[in-house]
Image (cartoon, rainbow, N blue to C red):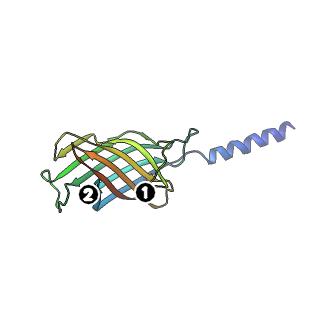
Amino acid sequence: MKTSLLLGLLAASSLLAGSAQADVDVHCISQGYSTSSEGRRLYTDAELTLLVGDRPNRDGVFKVWSVQGHINVGAIDTLPPLNEDNAYFAVFNTPELRSNPFYRPRKYKGYLQFPGLNATETTGLERGVGMWGTLLVQKRLNNRFRAKYIFKAGDHAGGTVHLVCSIQQG
């Protein structure tokens, strides 16, 4: 009896150890056009590196352990190259984001919502006013997947940056 109980505990602990959360290195880029809040084209140059937990905690919350990189968004109808006179430049160095377990999407179904992804530094148009927003990441982390950054910048700019992401093999 004691032996079978001990074997059961060992088997359960090995199953739990096998299901421990793993962190996944992700690289996301956007080079081309994104969408303004009015549906117009915004030229975008973005590159973000994320460290993502691959499963939720017991409260159903996923974590992004870090976000580093940049998002540069041109003013409406701006053509490349982007510069400080025609674009918003944002740098990100965010230590942690938590998913919103109560997110009920109407448009981006199949995505997790990570509110509070705010730039740590901004230059370009309306220098220093800021860029802030929400990161959406597809729930299924395949080798290639999509993410969205829904943002506001300055007093009046905003839109959605469409990102293509890939898992980096370590």
Residue 46 in the image: state x and y as whole percent. 29, 55
Residue 62 in the image: state x and y as whole percent. 50, 44
Q: Amino acid at mark 2?
A: Asp
The residue to which callout 1 is attached is 168
Q: Is residue 105 left or right of residue 118?
A: right
The residue furthest right is 1
Please say if 12 is above or below 78.
above
Residue 121 in the image: state x and y as whole percent. 24, 41
Q: Secondary structure at mark 2?
A: strand
Q: Is residue 40 left or right of residue 56?
A: left
Q: CA distance from mark 2 to mark 1?
A: 20 Å
The residue furthest left is 85
The residue lying at 78 percent from left, 42 percent from top is: 7
**Residue toward you, 166 or 8:** 166
Q: Which mark is residue 45?
A: 2
What quarter of the picture does the N terminus occupy? top right
- Disc 2 crowd, CA 10 A, few/some/many (<14, 14-19, 20+): many
Q: Amino acid at mark 1?
A: Gln
| Mark toward the start of the polypeptide (2 vs 1) | 2
Q: Secondary structure at mark 1?
A: loop
Q: Is residue 165 left or right of residue 10?
A: left
**Residue toward you, 74 or 13:** 74
Count of numbered labels shown in the rendering: 2
Q: Which mark is residue 135?
A: none
